[in-house]
């Protein structure tokens, strides 16, 4: 009888240059450059790389630490309910951006919460084409308005003042963020408005709908 093959603790990964093996994979993956780890690998391999990179833990520490710091400061002014609701709404906003970045394959910095300013993350790659940039910009306010709508429904069901405050606050924040000025998300939609085609009509219609939703939730 033949002998059974011994299991190998190796991971097979492919990129557009050539196939390669890493073993032991934890140390080797940590040394991979960011473009290879997040852009060139295929789905399952990309997820493995992200989970093994030591920077992943640091990103979560930065995000959760800054969120907790913001909650503590907000609590001193408005109490725990509103403090948690404000940070959760900002997290929804940034996760909306992050979801689109992930779909477009754009690497990003960790989400950082800045007390009394909001939350932010930045692209770690060149600016995408105008349509992708517009979708990326609108995803944040759309997610924030979804959170505001949830607060509004909960307020109508329970009549808790904190929920009504959160619905109004996040609606106002989304409306401000849709203004076409400076570093606001609305300014990132402007490049597409100068290009002809149906994409401009769709994005402009989406922008109008978001503004209407924000006004309706205030």
Image (cartoon, grey):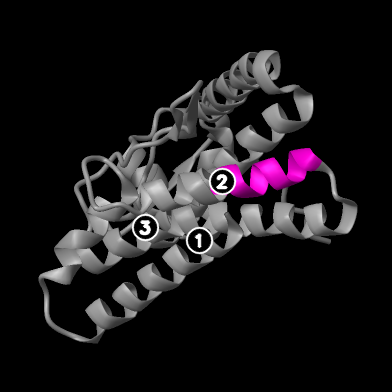
Kindly report the secondary structure that dominates the magenta region of the rendered protein.
helix
Q: Quadrant of the C terminus?
A: bottom right
Q: Looking at the image, is mark 1 or mark 2 nearer the viewer?
A: 1
Residue span colored magenta:
161-170
- x, y (%) of residue 201? 27, 82
Q: Is residue 192 left or right of residue 154?
A: left
Residue that protrudes farthest toward the bottom in the picture:
198
Residue at mark 1: 215
| Residue shown at the point (25%, 60%) measured from the top left | 189
Residues under numbered marks 1 and 2 in contact, where contact means CB atoms less than 8 Å apart? no
Under circle 3, the secondary element is: helix
Q: Quadrant of the N terminus?
A: bottom right
Horizontal side, residue 148 vs residue 35: left or right? right
Q: Extreme right residue here? A: 158
Which residue is under mark 2?
A: 170
Picture layout, residue 77 above or below residue 11: above
**Residue at 55% across, 40% down:** 90
Q: Earlier in the sequence, mark 1 or mark 2?
A: 2
Decide: is 84 above or below 156: above
Disc 3 versus disc 2: nearer the observer? 2
């Amino acid at each position: 009888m033949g002998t059974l093959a011994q299991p190998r603790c190796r991971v097979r990964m492919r990129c557009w240059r050539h196939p390669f093996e890493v073993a032991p994979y934890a140390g080797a993956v940590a040394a991979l450059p960011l473009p290879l780890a997040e852009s060139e690998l295929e789905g399952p391999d990309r997820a493995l790389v992200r989970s093994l990179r030591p920077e992943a833990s640091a990103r979560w520490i930065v995000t959760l630490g800054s969120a907790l710091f913001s909650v503590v400061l907000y609590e001193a002014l408005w109490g725990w309910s509103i403090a948690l609701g404000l940070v959760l709404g900002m997290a929804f906003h940034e996760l909306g951006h992050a979801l689109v970045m992930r779909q477009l394959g754009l690497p990003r910095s960790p989400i950082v919460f800045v007390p009394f300013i909001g939350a932010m993350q930045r692209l770690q790659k060149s600016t995408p084409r105008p349509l992708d940039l517009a979708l990326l910009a609108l995803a944040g306010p759309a997610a924030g308005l979804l959170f505001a709508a949830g607060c509004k429904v909960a307020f109508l069901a329970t009549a808790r003042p904190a929920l009504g405050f959160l619905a109004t606050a996040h609606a106002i924040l989304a409306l401000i963020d849709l203004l076409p000025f400076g570093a606001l998300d609305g300014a990132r939609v402007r490049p597409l408005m100068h290009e002809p085609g149906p994409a401009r009509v769709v994005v402009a219609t989406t922008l109008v709908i978001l503004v209407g939703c924000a006004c309706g939730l205030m």
